[in-house]
Amino acid sequence: MSTIGAITEQAIELAQSAELAQEVEAEDAQSVAAAEGAGLAYGLAAIGPGIGIGYLVGQAVQAMARQPESAGQVQTTMFLGIAFTEALALLGFVVFIMLKFV
Amino acid sequence: MTMTPVLAALEFPPIENVVEWPAMFGDGWYAFNKIALIALIATAAPALLFFMAGRRSKLVPRGVQSFVEAIISFVENQVAKPGIGTGYEPYMPLLISFFCFIAVGNLFEVIPFFQMPLNARMGAPLVLALVAYFFFIIVGMKHNGARNYLRMVAFPSGVPKAMYILVTPIELVSTFVVRPFSHAIRLFANMLAGHILLVSFGVLCIAVWQLKLLVVLEALTFPGLIAFTAFEIGVSLIQAFVFAILASVYIGGALHPEH
């Protein structure tokens, strides 16, 4: 009776450890996928706003060079435009944080 | 193979260690931690400054008064006037409060022993953005009438009638649903990114310091840390400015929705 009990216990333990190992492997795979996705998400999200902000600031500098007396107004509008353009990159950053850490 | 110790030393701390702080006292809903302390200081410091400046105001400002007047005229000329236009005066207190609270809260990112921007936790920017959100909706409804305001937002003039199928849902969603979130996330993500940037450079400096021969690399990383600290001071102030000017643009849009 006791030997059967011991064997069953051992079998259960074995099964549990195998399950645990499988779970750990699955978690590893998941975290690897999350890290890859996070890097990809932020990298892709940074392309568009990068081009946009570069173009925006370039045009603003051109406007300020042509009409230095309107520099203040152009600057305020430029910051506003940067804030709107940048939002997309920041959403990408938030997705990165959520995939990587949360 | 010689690179292995370098990589091994570069262990980035988990994100919880960087943005979560243990409670100083209290627990649960009433826990009081470093973030709460920073929020209190960011509320009290500008209030104290403005009180000191206004207590004995003179016609020719000196010292504290001239500093505060510089802040006020900056907010007036760079934030309120371009965003709201004529009739901006009643909204100045809100915009100055936004600017000062966010600027001081952000500057704690680089103040030694705190080194945590208030707005790197989602709570503070979310509440600020919700204040701005309800404020501009109430201003728009009071100024134009509730029905008139909604009509002006949903059906902007100068659009062909058939385009309203496309324009109306976009306008409604972007004004009443997306706005508070984009307003809050802009501030939050900027400050969190800056905080993580500074933490990464700090970790890098410590990791390089522990190397035997490669310690000369500190000549690259330590000036980098200093430069990014200076950069983050600029980002803190610019983000406070951007938050205030967006609030002012939203209020201006609610006051004159026809533009």
Image: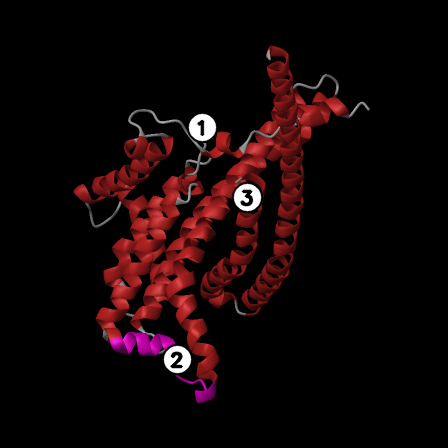
User: Residue A10: in sight, yes or no?
Assistant: yes
Q: Residues within 10 Å of mark 2 (few under 14, many from 20)?
A: some
Question: Is the C-beta separation of discs 3 and 2 under 8 Å?
Answer: no
In screen coordinates, is B251 left or right of A30?
left
Q: Which residue is mark 2?
A: B156
**Which residue is disc 1 drawn over?**
B112
Q: SS of the residue at dot 2?
A: loop
Establish whether labels 3 and 2 are both on one chain.
no
Instruction: Report whether mark 3 lies on the same chain as mark 1.
Output: no
Residue B119, position in %: x, y? 41, 43
Magenta stretch: residue B152 in it?
yes
Chain to which the residue tagged by mark 1 belongs = B
Depth check, front residue: B11 or B28: B28
**SS of the residue under disc 3:** helix
**How many residues crowd mark 3 within 10 Å: few (<14), some (14–19), many (20+)?**
some
Q: How many marks?
A: 3
Q: Where residue A33 sits: x, y (%)?
A: 66, 44
Say which quadrant the C terminus of chain B sits in.
bottom left
Residue behind mark 3: A97
How many angstroms separate mark 3 from mark 1 (CA)? 25 Å
Give the magenta-colored segment's residue range. Answer: B147-162
Q: Eyeballing the image, is A62 above or below A44?
A: below
* Residue in view at x 44 percent, y 84 percent: B159
Three-letter residue code for mark 2: Pro
* Amino acid type of the residue that numbered disc 3 sits on in the rendered structure: Ile
In the rendered structure, which disc, 1 or 2, sits on the residue that comes first in sequence?
1
